[in-house]
Amino acid sequence: MKLGVLETGKVASQLSEKFGAYPQMFERLLREAAARSGFDLSFEVHSLLDGAPLPEIGACDAWLVTGSRHGVYDNLPWIAPLRGFLRRAHDADAPLIGVCFGHQILAEALGGRAEKSERGWGLGVHNYEIVSDHAWMGVTPFERMDLHAVHQDQVTIPPPGARTLAQSEFCPFAALAYGPEAAPTAISIQAHPEFQADFVDALITLRTGDGFPVDAARAGQTSLGAPVANAAMADWMIAFLCAAQARDVAERPFTAIST
């Protein structure tokens, strides 16, 4: 399966040499999970920030939208076209994964709302309650899950028909699924399974006082070092892609081969 990664944010230049770009973080995360399950996965990156046109929906088998320091409400030339792309892809049952900004813009594209939360910034390790468990997720030995969070915006009104997969007091719609309950066509999460603790620590240090309030930054950095469930979340993503690929194969019309 070819996964198209829609890059909607850039890692700060002070951090990119050490940690790489967001698509590279996702590739590392998902390659390891794909290897664990024996799933054949390749990647194709499309950087929307560089002014490149959106690809054709059929150019890749599935799509992932990265995080970004931008908001879904920002007046940037690529945001409205991305909303339209996601609506068309969803209507075409193309498998979609959204993370952080990707989670928010997918919800907006499908009729929900994302905005700056009155709860403020969520930084560091956050704990989420898993409130849905379906066969496509594979074996899920968790009732709760710790993941790295770096966000002030969040989904405040989920789209019609969206189902909550994970939640917390700080972020009630922390993970969503769309489409059939047993075999969703899209999933999204607010937290960052692609982030490692050292990157979150460096990012918080860089932006403290210039975006991140000092108190929230200190609390976030204090939480770092706790075990996080990045691998489990990556396994969910691969399980979702496996189920989507199986559904696609099952729905293809049978073509007889004459001899």
Image: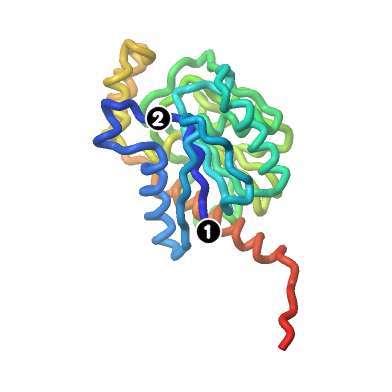
Q: Earlier in the sequence, mark 1 or mark 2?
A: 1
Residue 158 lies in quadrant: top right
Q: Residue at point 55% right, 33% down? A: 103
Q: Residue furthest front?
A: 52
Label 1 with label 2: CB-CB less than 8 Å: no
> Which secondary structure, mark 2?
loop
| Mark 2 Cα shell of 10 Å, populated few (<14), some (14-19), many (≥20) | some
Instruction: Name the amino acid, label 1.
Output: Met
Residue 190 can be seen, yes or no: no
Instruction: Name the amino acid, label 2.
Output: Lys
The count of marks equals 2
Q: Residue at point 36% right, 37% down? A: 21
> Which secondary structure, mark 1?
loop
Q: Position of residue 241 (x, y in %)?
A: 55, 54
Depth order, front residue of 249/79: 79
Q: Tell me the distance, in whole angstroms, between the alpha carbons under discs 1 and 2.
A: 25 Å
Q: Where 120 falls versus 198 (above or below)?
A: above
Q: Residue at point 48% right, 29% down? A: 49
Look at mark 1 in the image and give the residue it sits on: 1
Q: Position of residue 57 (x, y in %)?
A: 63, 46
Q: Residue furthest bottom?
A: 259
| Mark 1 Cα shell of 10 Å, populated few (<14), some (14-19), many (≥20) | some
Q: Position of residue 61 (x, y in %)?
A: 58, 54
Residue 13 is tagged as none
Q: Position of residue 65 (x, y in %)?
A: 52, 38
Residue 22 can be seen, yes or no: yes
Residue 10 lies in quadrant: top left
Residue 162 lies in quadrant: top right
Residue 10 is tagged as 2
